Amino acid sequence: QKSPGLQQGFRSMFFMLTPNESSFQKVEAVPQYVEQATPFFIGLMVLELLVGVLKTGGSVVTISDGLTSISAGMVSRLPMLLMRGCELSAYMYVWDHYHLVELPWDSAWTWWLTFLGVDFCYYWVHRFAHEVAVLWAAHQVHHSSEYYNLTTALRQSLTQQFTSWIFYMPLALALPPSIFAVHIQLNLLYQFWIHTELIRDLGPLELIFNTPKHHRVHHGRNLYCIDKNYGGILIIWDRIFGTFASETDKVIYGLVFPIRRFEILHVQFHYYLYLWKKSKIYKTIIHKLATFFNGPSWKPGKSRLGDHDDNPKVCIIPQRKMPSGFITHHFDTRKTQMLSQLTVLGMTCYILLTLTSLGFIIDQRPRAASLEMLRCVIMVTMHRYSYIKPFLPLLAVPTEVRPTVVCLGTVETCCLHCCHTDSCQKPIHD
Ligand SMILES: [Zn+2]
Ligand SMILES: [Zn+2]
């Protein structure tokens, strides 16, 4: 697999690649643009923080919210440890068995057509994710932050990919998987930089492209923002299909019913439970099904999408702060490549435990201390057997646990290594 290189990797964040440099014959040759974007994510988030301080005099990110978003980003990529993305896997299957024509992979026309096709399909993936409650249960994760900054972009759903692939299948009848594999990544990456309040207006670009201004509206819970601006790279689809709204009043971000919790599994899964409970209230099977397949605001007697006037009116709620102080570390990727699936599963559980523990601490729940203690024990064990290594050597925790008996008595009651006489109080060294 080719590495895109620093400069190309940076340009991939803004859809600034040419067909020439990003057309490949085989899927295997397509660079992992998203995986390799991590340094740019971090760099741009730091830049946003600094510019934000200079411009507004305060931080545009809070630790608790930012960490929850980054955690969600990590969780959403966990299935990738075990398999190729659902979207690409399904695409390759349909292409192999059912494609009708084979457009040339090395033509710029194919490349641009795939760009338009992927962006058009994304519009519908996204619109269905908002208009069908059971799909919204996955996508609401992305909207659960009450802040709007670059970390919000990373707040992705773990489960959305298990349904979104369906929408791209028509493309697999004609467009080669290797070109699709490029565009499905570029489409996602483009949507990173638009999650910022620091860029206000981009003039004529606002007519065609999805911009920070348009996407802010998409994240709003003001009445005029609900179910608007679904576009990925282009905003023209919203203009064509009547879902476009321009930014007017100050946007208040987040869910109509804010969750205000930071535990990562709660953020990812709470809405499924909510839907289940909601469906149990209704007596008829039609109403029960409608709970899952109509819009999230639907109620019996209302239209498919419900009545947004019933939603609570927007107001600003103060945010909770979190205590600081924890250790960052990451998995040793060289080792990951050789791991058995069982070990990967174990590591996945560990990541989930870490993020859940973090959420417990932020939420100041009574069991936070015991959960964190359990996590520490597991972490030390994993360090000991080299399954993980610290992000920075400086942050390494001592994993070689050696006896440090404090000598309290005479020489005879201590071990042979003790060099002190009389009533020494110093730990014994080996
Ligand atoms: Zn959305
Ligand atoms: Zn967004």
Image (cartoon, helix red, strand yellow):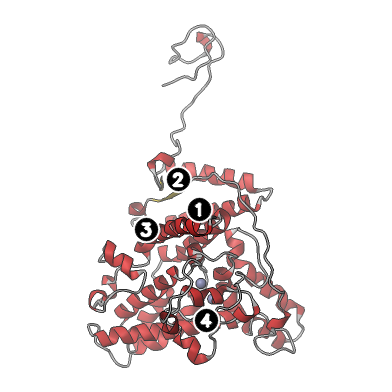
Q: Nearer the viewer, mark 4 or mark 3?
A: 4
Relative to residue 152, is residue 5 drawn left or right?
left
Label 2–label 1 contact, CB within 8 A: yes
Q: Nearer the viewer, mark 4 or mark 1?
A: 4
Residue identifier under label 2: 382
Residue sitting at the far top: 422
Residue identifier under label 3: 39
Pinpoint residue 278: horizontal percent, then vertical percent: 72, 76
Q: Earlier in the sequence, mark 4 or mark 2?
A: 4
Q: Amino acid at mark 4?
A: Asn
Pinpoint residue 94: horizontal percent, then vertical percent: 37, 84
Query: What is the distance, in whole Å, between disc 3 and disc 2 at their CAs?
Result: 25 Å
Quadrant location, the C terminus: top left
* SS assignment at label 4: loop
Query: What is the distance, in whole Å, between disc 4 and disc 2 at their CAs?
Result: 45 Å
Query: What is the distance, in whole Å, between disc 4 and disc 1 at their CAs?
Result: 37 Å
